Each structure stands twice: as C-alpha cells, then as structure tokens.
Image (cartoon, rainbow, N blue to C red):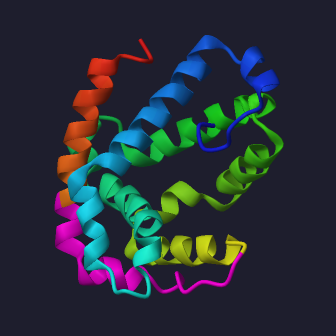
Amino acid sequence: MGDFKPSKELQDRLPKPVLSGIENHRLVDRLTDKYPPVKDLKRLFSPGRRRFAGIVTDIAFDYYLIKHWNLFETQEFEPFVQQCYAGLEDCLHWMPPRMHYVVSSMIEHGWLSNYVSLEGIARSIDQVSKRMRFENNMAGSIIEIERNYEQIEQVFLTLFAFLKEEVEQAALER
C-alpha cells in the first residue's frame, strides 16, 4: 500500500499494523534508492535503457530474493506466496481502488510465482513497459539483467543484508 499513496481519509481508518507496514515499506524504498551500489548499477545498463534501470533492477531483485529464499527464510516459498495472497484477499477492503485492482490481478495471474525464473521476470518487465503512459523501450530489458547477472546478484545480496539490519533497527512493525 506504500506504493499507492492512500488518501488521508483512508489512512485515518487503517489499523496501526497496516500503517506501520506502509511506513516500513517506504523506509525500504528510500534505503534502496539511496544505497550506493544500487545507484551504481545504472551505469551497467545500455544508454537507451538506463532511464529504466531502477524499475528493471527492482524486478530483478525479486527474482534474486526467490533464488536465495532459503538464506533468508525457513518457510518454503510457495506456501509463503499462498499465505500472502490469502492475507491480501482478507484486506482488500482496506485498499484504495487502484491497489484493489492490481492486487486482484496479482492473485489471479500468480505474479509472485512468475518471479522464480528469468523468463517470468522478462514477462513482468515487458508488462510494466506496456502499462506505462508513454512510449518506451523498456520491453526486452531482460537482456540487461542477463548481461550483468552476477553484478546485480551481488548488489542484491549486500543490499538485502543491509536492509535487514536497518529494518530491524528501525523496528517500525514491532
């Protein structure tokens, strides 16, 4: 919900744990955007796609999270996904209309499971490209990930360790 900027009226009605989750999500986004190794990834992208490096690496990070899932989580990935979908469905009434639509589509089309493969990531990147309100050449950006696979993976691993530490210290959801 942190990406959907709920109205002040909706925010006033949200339970404290949801508000804490939004705050935590926004902290992670800010820390990721400011993290120097993440910023440095932009230079690895071809000049024509550099503008979309942040979006593409964000999607790639989801792939690397799943690839290294067992380093971070004891619960298996697929049961976790089903638990997430059930939790999201239970909370649809709290979501702004646009988020309601996106989450419903996410569940229906199994977006999270698409991120287990580079092919799924490629489809996701291309879908995001189609949803943009302007012409762009982001579609096909999977080539940027494939070309820089190890560098992006290493940045993800250091970023995730950094984020875990920062989120624990912030303790926004305790």
Where's residue 106, x and y in %? Answer: 65, 54
Figure check: 120 above or below 87 = below
Q: Is residue 102 magenta?
A: no
Q: How many marks?
A: 0
Residue 142, image x, y percentages: 41, 81
Please tell me in which quadrant of the rendered image residue 44 appears. Answer: bottom left
Q: Is residue 109 left or right of residue 168?
A: right
Asked if residue 6 lies left or right of residue 126, the reply is right
Q: Position of residue 18 (x, y in %)?
A: 60, 22
Q: In this image, 31 relative to 48: left or right?
A: left
Quarter holding residue 131: bottom right
The percent coordinates of residue 8 (x first, y second) are 76, 25
Give the residue displayed 54% in from the left and 87% down from the top.
137
Q: Is residue 146 above or below residue 18?
A: below
User: Magenta stretch containing residue 148, yes or no?
Assistant: yes
Up/down of 117 relative to 135, above or below: above
Q: Residue at x 37, y 61 (%)?
A: 63
What residue sits 54% from the left and 36% below the top?
A: 83
Front residue of 83/38: it is: 38
The residue segment tinted magenta is 134-154
- Of residues 73 and 102, the one nearer the viewer is 102
Residue 168: quarter of image: top left
Q: Which quadrant does the C terminus fall into?
A: top left
- Name the image quarter holding the N terminus: top right
Decide: is 118 above or below 162. Answer: below
